[in-house]
Image (cartoon, coloured by chain):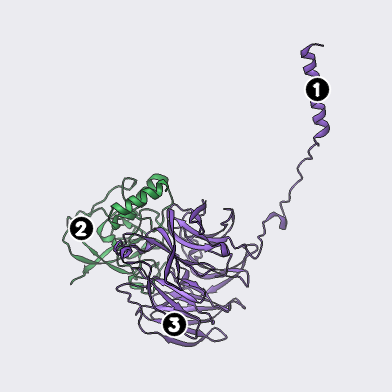
Amino acid sequence: MSSQYRAVRWLLAACSLMLLTVPVRAELPAEPTTGPETVVRLPTPYPQSWAMVHNFSFVALIDSSFGLVDTSTGHFKGIISAGQFATLQWSQKRQKFYVGETIHSRGNRGTREDLIAVYDFENLKLVKDIVIPTKRANSVVLKASTAITADDRFLIVYNFDGSMSLTVIDLDTESVVDEIPTAGCALAYPDTRGGIFQLCGDGKLAHLQLDSRGGLKKRTTSEMFNDIDTDPLSEKASLIGQTWYFTTYLGEVQPIDVSGKTPAIKRRWWLTDEAERKDNWRPAGWHGTAGDASGALYVAMTPNGYNGSHKDPALEVWVYDPSKARRIKTIKLETPGLSIGVANGNQADLLVLNVAGGLDVYDTRNGKLSRTLYDIGSAPMQVHAVGTAQ
Amino acid sequence: MNVMEKVTRRIARQSSRRGFLGKLGGLLVGAAAIPLLPVARASSAGPASRVPAQSTGNPMDPGDPTTCEYWRYCGIDGYICSCCGGSQNQCPPGTEMSPMTWVGTCRNPADGKNYVISYNDCCGKSGCGRCLCNRNEDDKPVYRPPANNDINWCMAGSNVYNCSTAVILGLAEA
């Protein structure tokens, strides 16, 4: 037997063996194109690592959106469409999103309509359009433009059409129940008892208690505590536990304790020491504050601050134990950041929307960049950790 | 430390703060065609700009009104109308100027005087998309509206924002 013949026999034997041992693959089954199986449903409640990225869509303001992402995997889960100058609130109890938006009957023209569009968590599907007075504040991305009261009962919408007021929406009936004039005072920060407070243009704070129907029960006003001309409180604050933490343009922290009947304006403290102030380290970013489950306060910071640097990108995020007014960590950003948030429960991943349009996820245990999510909108400017309570 | 961080840190250290974002914006836009963000200033300016230069024609009103560095824009936030068919003090055709606005104060380098600038938005057409510029000198938070540049001032007629002007109201010291 020639060596050539032996080789051919071996080859045939090997092929026969393969045919015997490898199962014949079945053809792929036909897949549905109609019915509920054609659309993905999301697991609810969401994992703690999920977040909503607010795409302000600066290049097409009338068509903004919110993109739902899993920050632990980088996977994109879906979007909610929105009109111009949108806002986002959500309720873990109700498993719903509440999107504030302004639209026009003919797209970029026609009759203005303001809405709170209600979406469910599981399907990101529109549940209801709540028509609200056409005066909701149209501001560049700002969390405090809306609020949900701590009892999860009322959604508050800040209005500005030259004058200031609040629209109150009952979340049980999903309908407008009242409009409260708030001359000179803006925005809405929930307390822990079903009311809200506002910041006023004269440097005071106004506290509003609501009655059971969402009407104004009692308004109180603080003493002047906010020197707006010299060093104002940024309106981009974070609630950690029962205290709101505001930062000033120059770098002080103003805690406001909302555990009591009326807000308590607590003692201020500096984010920086004297040497850092000499280098003009200051708070920065579009929304530069966040808190985590342990109670730590995160502040986006930039060096060489100046008149007008309060919205500059941040180069670092400084982490504080606010109970001791002491910095406990510094996270240097790989790419300068615009807005920050914290997700993933006790693991406390720091989320940073960077100037390149990506979402950076930092491991706060070691300060290292874990991953970056790309292609999350034309102008992502705000991140909401929707997998956790607000 | 990656390249982006090295560059931005070097810029931050070496430049005046006023120029930081301008250079950063130019870097981002020019190097990576990254989406323009309101805080990434000076998309209109620098070598990456494709917008032809303009002049007011008045030596007492110096600078290029299509650039973010133009002196009147010290508190502007939005698309520069000079790049959109309007000018530093006029809206593009077919839009309307919002009568409600916010005002800032900018120093004119030609005479060293401070002028009150009214940043009137132009309304009624969708966003121009050209020469995005965000500077925040003397910008105060939203709870003091007459001094805030985050508000869409298109609220008296059409609510659709097109671009922003910078109109001189007079001397600040007058």
Is the residue at mark 3 from the same chain as the one at mark 1? yes
Task: Say whether marks 3 and 1 touch (CB < 8 Å).
Answer: no
Kindly indicate the quadrant of the structure image that contains residue A303: bottom left
Between the residue at mark 2 and the residue at mark 1, the CA separation in whole angstroms equals: 90 Å
Mark 3 lies on residue: A264
- Tell me residue B65's x, y (percent): 27, 55
The chain containing the residue under callout 3 comes to A
What is the drawing colour of chain B? green
Q: Residues within 10 Å of mark 1 (few under 14, many from 20)?
A: few
The amino acid pointed to by label 3 is: Ala
Q: Which residue is found at the position 43% from the left and 49% from the top?
A: B34
Please, what secondary structure does the residue beneath circle 2 have? loop
Q: Is residue A64 visible?
A: no
Name the residue that disc number 1 marks: A12
Q: Determine which residue is flagged by label 2.
A: B61
Of the numbered discs 3 and 1, the one sitting upstream in the chain is: 1
Report in which chain the residue with disc 1 lies.
A
Q: Which chain is purple?
A: A
Subunit bearing disc 2: B
